[in-house]
Image (tube, rainbow, N blue to C red):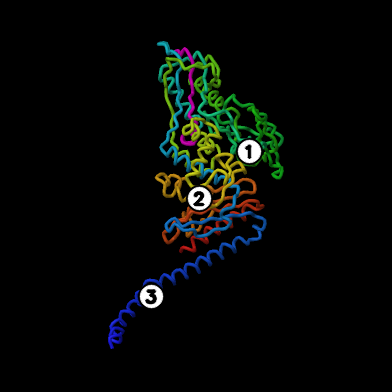
Amino acid sequence: MSFFRFTVRIYPYIGIFFLIIFKIFLPGIFFAINLEANTNNLNKQIQTLLKNLDLKQVSCGISVVSLKKNVSVYNYRSNNLFSVASNMKLLTTAAALDYLGPNFTYETSIEANGVITDSGKLKGDVVLKGSGDPNLSGRFYHGNILAVPESWANAIRSRGISRITGDIIADDTIFDRVYTRPSWSKNQLSAWYCAPSCGLSFNDNCVDITLISSKKPGNAVILLINPDTSYFTIVNNCIGTSDKKEHAYSMYREPETNRIFITGKFWINASPKREWVTVYNPALYLATVFKEVLEKYGILVDGTARLIDETDVADAHRERITQTTSTMGQTISVTNKRSQNFYAEQILKTLGAHVNGEGSTKSGIDILHNFMNKLGFHSDEYHIEDGSGLSKGNRFSPHMITSLLTYMYKHPHGKVLYDSLPVSGKDGGLKDRMVSPQYKNRVHAKTGYIAKVSTLSGYINTPNGDVLAFSILMNNFNNLRSIHKVQDDICRTLINYYN
């Protein structure tokens, strides 16, 4: 009888207990089933894209991570190693933000090394003391390539100096004088994207050459050289042609010289075409141009433009006349938005110089290894050969890149990296990609391309408020346009999935 009464009393509570259980766990069960179904659907959609016939021989890896939920969303060979092209710049610029910060300042000093007399004579030299600054160009001066050396000449004239009895000395010792990497293609070292790295640089260590039609077949093409300097010897064998099909020309700089050869034919009705050719010995390039600017400003220079050497000793009367500065923040913006290899190599050596005390590529790579160790990866798990990605030997996995992106998204300076990335349908390498309203501005990512390597890694802002870190690495393809389409379609699929 007592057992019956106990059962009657507890029965309602049993019902309530099971009701609570169902209320708490049943929605979660259905949510998990629904989530798995959606994930399977996403997997199927991306796998369908990867079955594209143009990808038949392509080696591909993908990693996608939800930063708000801190979960992996999609993986495809995400731990395999791939050549990463300019996605290498993500590591270089992230390390610079981590170790030096966006407010790190490059300072290029113009110093009088000697005595300045009352009559305006500098009895001694002018020293250009480099800091590895890649920004000494017209980029931040309304396109005026000579803006910086002209400002220096004005400062010297304002100091009352009208004659320099000594030399114009280029002090590039903040970095070593190993200008390029042995892994770069030897037959491309004249091209702007192989510009040398140096402790004292100017105009992205290139000369601008504009070809203008002579309007008469057989006549030599007209050349505009900027800056117009004696530092180069240009051999112009390019002539005009009336046959548009014959329009083809090339520029070539003889190795370890500044002799530039221009050959081929230029269509007489073609619009002017600007090209960029790299220089040899960038520090001497700047010193030579500066000497020429000084003379144009009426300041006599008795000596020559030359590199600093072991015989040069700092004079007790050395005086700073002026200096030019720029920040790591603006440097990183140019590096990623414009995918400037030269800038990335300058940053790499800057890391080596200021963190390790040696401005070399090896020293900079050591810092990148330290940074990767912070992310949880050992140096034998990947490979680094430069800071820009120009070398095909840089090899990383998609998972490593999304780990870097995840780390930087939470970093105090992470927004600087985010803002430096090209934006879909807006600028940089993504200006003409994913331009439709539903995709424009949603993808902030670094593009990358070298022969048979195309990569895209960065962030996706989803319609539901999540942020995805993603990396798509593709090697060994033949049709770049098809590869770009697949990459863009994967990004679109991810955006639609969260819509």
x 58%, y 52%: residue:
473
Residue 257: give x, y in percent of width and height.
64, 27
Q: What amino acid is at disc 1? A: Trp
Q: In this rendered view, identify the residue nearer to me: 214 or 145.
A: 145
Confirm whether the magenta stretch covers residue 125. yes
Give the residue number, with chain letter if any, for mark 3.
Answer: 22
Above or below for 265 versus 297: below
Residue ID for mark 1? 184
Q: Which three-letter amino acid code belongs to the residue tagged 3?
A: Phe
Secondary structure found at label 1: loop
Q: Residues within 10 Å of mark 2 (few under 14, many from 20)?
A: many
Q: Quadrant of residue 223?
A: top right
| Callout 1–callout 3 Cβ contact below 8 Å | no
Q: Main secondary structure of the magenta part?
A: loop
Marks 2,3: beta carbons within 8 A: no
| Label 1, residues with CA under 10 Å away: few <14, some 14-19, many ≥20 | some
The CA span between labels 1 and 2 is 25 Å
Q: Secondary structure at mark 3?
A: helix
Residue 248 in the figure: left or right of residue 319: right
Above or below, 75 against 10 in this view is above
Q: Tell me where residue 412 sits by quadrant.
A: top left
| Residue 82 percent coordinates (x, y) | 60, 49
Going by the numbered disc 2, the residue's amino acid type is Ala
- Residue 2 position (above or below residue 60): below
Q: Nearer the viewer, mark 1 or mark 2?
A: 1
Which residue matches tag 2?
A: 445
Tell me: residue 332, above or below residue 435: above
From the viewer's perspective, tell me whether residue 240 is left or right of residue 321: right
Residues under labels 1 and 3: Cα distance?
Answer: 64 Å
Foreground mark, 1 or 3, reads 3
Magenta part of the chain: 121-143
Given this view, does label 2 or label 3 mark the residue nearer the observer? 3
